[in-house]
Amino acid sequence: NMKEIKKAVIPVAGFGTRLLPATKAQPKEMLPIVDKPAVQYVVEEAVNSGIEELLLVTGRNKRAIEDYFDYAIELERELEEKGKTDLLNVVRNVSEMVSIYYVRQKVANGLGDAIYHAKGFVSDEPFAVLLADDIIDSSKPCLKQMINVYKSYPGIILAVMKVPIKDTNLYGIVKGKKIDDRLYEVEDLIEKPNPMEAPSNIAIVGRYILMPSIFESLKDTKPGKNGEVQITDAIRNLLIKEKIYAYEFEGARFDVGEKLGYLKANVSFALKNKEFGKEFKKYLKDIVEEA
Ligand code: UTP
């Protein structure tokens, strides 16, 4: 009687220093990728993967996110009166996608600490974590792919992708044994090793399926790299207790938490836009030739 994954946690309490000054007075998760805030892509991925309840771990200066998923009474009335039904539906759908809970992380003590704030929400069920920094463009939502893996391999599942060896110091890196198509059994994991020490180039990206056992482990996890409680360390402590798998998802991942990745995501999604994708492509071709 395996429990299904119906709950997900999206931590959004980080400072977003890599995107300064844009993030000085607004959450990075609210920066648009073409016409939707980054966080909405991730919420949609969760909903399209069968998640029914979401917890956002927020912090100071993040209130715009809560307002975004709430009703916008005055705006909706205005659109209704003007007969702008299409826009009204777009705006209203955002607030009716899924039930969202909020908890505040008062001090940004790291991703692991942010996830620890989900203890009460999660209770005794397996759950998913999605980072809004990682936007994954795929025909089947990344989390849905992972939930499918979980059905055959119940355990902790980490989304991974191969990265250039020189970039291992930017990621949690997995040492694993290949056991199935796109699937590794994890033997060890290391947070941000330099290329000389990295056991592989298999890097963890911002999608996890975790067990409630993570909370016990987090409680015992000391601050690691950057003085922050690292989720990688807490997962590592579970190696003796839980099966841990790394799944190489299908899709293109954008790190929208840094400037170049943010730009790439915008260009890539703009090219796919039904309304102006063709025209945008032509524009890009023209300016690239001129440059
Ligand atoms: P990052 O490592 O990207 O940190 O966090 P950050 O503060 O958001 O951004 P930079 O590095 O300063 O540019 C990864 C994820 O963990 C969340 C962030 O919101 C992001 O989704 N996080 C991080 C928290 O919720 N709380 C924290 O204390 C740290």
Image: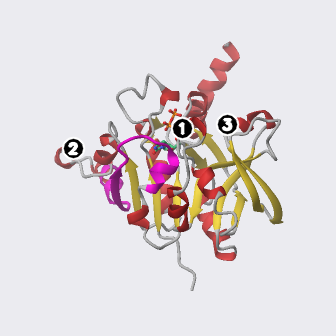
Give, as a three-letter code, the residue at label 2: Leu
Looking at the rendered image, the disc whose residue lies closer to the viewer, 3 or 2, is 3
**Which residue corresponds to mark 1?**
227
Choose the circle earlier in sequence order: 1 or 3: 3
Secondary structure beneath dot 2 equals: helix
**Placement of 288 over or under 131, stated as above or below:** above
Q: Is residue 220 magenta?
A: no
Looking at the rendered image, the disc whose residue lies closer to the viewer, 1 or 3, is 1
Q: How is the image coloured?
A: secondary structure
Can you see residue 53?
no
Choose the circle earlier in sequence order: 2 or 1: 2
CA–CA distance in space, label 1 to label 3: 16 Å
Give, as a three-letter code, the residue at label 1: Gly
Q: Quadrant of the C terminus?
A: top right
Specify whether tag 3 is near ligand 1 (CB below 8 Å): no
Q: Position of residue 11 (x, y in %)?
A: 45, 49
**Which residue corresponds to mark 3?**
170
Q: Tag count in the figure?
A: 3
Q: Is residue 66 left or right of residue 249?
A: left
Question: Mark 3: few, some, or many residues within 10 Å (few <14, many ≥20)?
Answer: some
Give, as a three-letter code, the residue at label 3: Leu
Question: Mark 1: few, some, or many residues within 10 Å (few <14, many ≥20)?
Answer: few
Q: Which residues fall within the magenta stretch?
A: 90-116
Choose the circle earlier in sequence order: 3 or 2: 2
- Along the viewing direction, whichever of 67 and 3 lies nearer the viewer: 3
**Placement of 98 over or under 65, stated as above or below:** below
CA–CA distance in space, label 2 to label 1: 43 Å
Q: Position of residue 68 (x, y in %)?
A: 32, 46
Q: Position of residue 196 (x, y in %)?
A: 83, 36
**Which residue corresponds to mark 2?**
75
